Amino acid sequence: MNIDGQIALITGGASGLGAATARYLAGKGAHIMVLDYDSQGAKAMADELGGHAVGCDVSDEDAVARAIDETVSICGVPRIVVNCAGIATGARIVGREGKLSTGQFRKTIEVNLIGSYHVMSYAARAMMQTDPLEGSERGVIINTSSAAFEDGQLGQAAYSASKGGIASLSLPAARELARYGIRVMAIAPGLFHTPLMDGLPDETVTKIIDNIPFPDRLGQPEEFAQLVVSIAENAYLNGTLIRLDGAVRLPPK
């Protein structure tokens, strides 16, 4: 797909990997629609890029339906959809004094997995109604998994399960949507320099980096964005997941 002139919708686009992706796609000539729970942050990012923004809780199906309708009304049908919205809170399955974390598990699944499914579903339905581009392609949907889907750490049961669902979703979704010329991919980032890392002590960050073989540093959000662009441009990438992690394998804790 030639990105120049296409409409790109990025969830979680107000910060972190989503913000880097929005900026990178804008630099390639895409028209940007930012969806984020933080409506003010989404607007600020959209204003920076000359795009548009919608405040949206992706776990709320009605909110996602309205957001996709608004995107189509304002910009047109998005040909590139990148799901970066997510939460990464941690909790033991059975914590101190026998406290369970079932509520947190449910919330994580609702935001990370079901939220991505909501956006993918409504975006795919909109794409189906468009004329195909060169090569019979109508669009590409890129979901964000995590290296934790394969080697989740202690306290990451909910997060790993949600990201494992996203990883497993890629192939059946790609097979189903292939007849419409819509591709589905997933990226599983490892340890990236995002706002979450900024709040950690230096010694903690150093220990994290010590587990990364090469390059021995945190990933840069722009490197995630570069892979998004490569996937969008390469029509033969479909139905699979790419780990982007510097060969790291997460230790138990």
Image: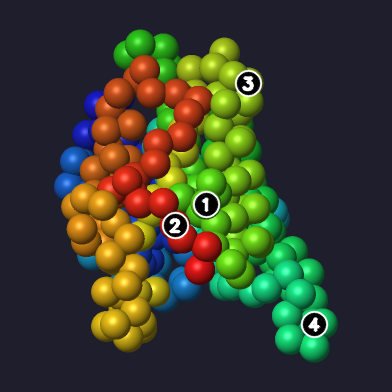
Identified by mark 3, the residue type is: Glu
Task: Indicate which disc residue 151 carries.
Answer: 1
Secondary structure at numbered mark 4: loop
Q: Does residue 134 appear in the picture of this structure? A: yes
Q: Nearer the viewer, mark 3 or mark 1?
A: 1
Identified by mark 4, the residue type is: Lys
Mark 1 closeness class: few <14, some 14–19, many ≥20 residues within 10 Å: some
Which residue is drawn at the image coordinates 50% and 25% (left, top)?
239
Question: x, y percentage for residue 45?
Answer: 31, 65
Q: What's the coloring here?
A: rainbow
Identified by mark 2, the residue type is: Leu
| Of callouts 1 and 4, the N-terminal one | 4
As displayed, is residue 165 above or below residue 217?
above
Mark 3 closeness class: few <14, some 14–19, many ≥20 residues within 10 Å: few
| Of callouts 3 and 4, the N-terminal one | 4
| Of callouts 1 and 2, the N-terminal one | 1
Secondary structure at numbered mark 3: helix
Alpha carbon separation for disc pair 1 and 4: 24 Å
Badge 4 is on which residue? 99
Tell me, yes or no, whether the two marked residues, 2 and 3, touch with CB atoms within 8 Å. Answer: no
Secondary structure at numbered mark 2: loop
Badge 2 is on which residue? 250
Alpha carbon separation for disc pair 3 and 1: 28 Å
Alpha carbon separation for disc pair 2 and 3: 33 Å
Mark 2 closeness class: few <14, some 14–19, many ≥20 residues within 10 Å: some
| Of callouts 2 and 4, the N-terminal one | 4
Tell me, yes or no, whether the two marked residues, 1 and 2, touch with CB atoms within 8 Å. Answer: yes
Mark 4 closeness class: few <14, some 14–19, many ≥20 residues within 10 Å: few
| Of callouts 3 and 1, the N-terminal one | 1
Q: Nearer the viewer, mark 2 or mark 3?
A: 2
Badge 3 is on which residue? 176
